[in-house]
Image (cartoon, helix red, strand yellow):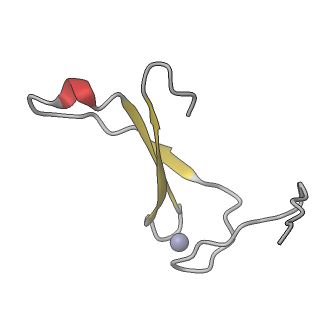
Amino acid sequence: MPVTITEDHDLVPLCPHCNQSLNVIAATTPVAQGSSAFKFGKRTVYACPSCRKALGISQRKGFWAG
Ligand SMILES: [Zn+2]
């Protein structure tokens, strides 16, 4: 089934946890610790600023673009 994707700049996503509008998304980059820390690359954790629950994690690792 074909799907059309439209870009909507007025779309405000809702937090799936507390249903607040995500006008702002908090992001933090935790520091990896331990002997395997070198494997971790750079990770960013995105969270809802209202309930602080994590929305997702992105990982940047050398040649990976995102
Ligand atoms: Zn929330």
Nearest the viewer among 61 and 16 is 61
Residue 21 lies left or right of residue 64; in this view the side is: right
- State the residue at coordinates (85%, 66%): 3
Image spot of residue 22 (x, y percent): 67, 64
Nearest the viewer among 1 and 3 is 1
* Quadrant of the snapshot with the N terminus: bottom right
Image quadrant in which you'd find residue 15:
bottom right
Residue 28 lies left or right of residue 38; in this view the side is: right
Q: Is residue 62 above or below residue 30?
A: above
- State the residue at coordinates (53%, 68%): 50
Q: Is residue 20 above or below residue 4?
A: below
Image quadrant in which you'd find residue 39:
top left
Q: Is residue 13 above or below residue 47?
A: below
Q: Residue furthest left?
A: 35
Residue 8 lies left or right of residue 41; in this view the side is: right
Image spot of residue 24 (x, y percent): 65, 55
Image spot of residue 41 (x, y percent): 35, 28
- State the residue at coordinates (78%, 65%): 12
Q: Residue furthest top?
A: 62
- State the residue at coordinates (50%, 46%): 27
* Quadrant of the snapshot with the C terminus: top right
- Count of numbered marks: 0
Q: Is residue 53 above or below residue 18?
A: above
Nearest the viewer among 3 and 6 is 3
Q: Residue furthest front?
A: 1
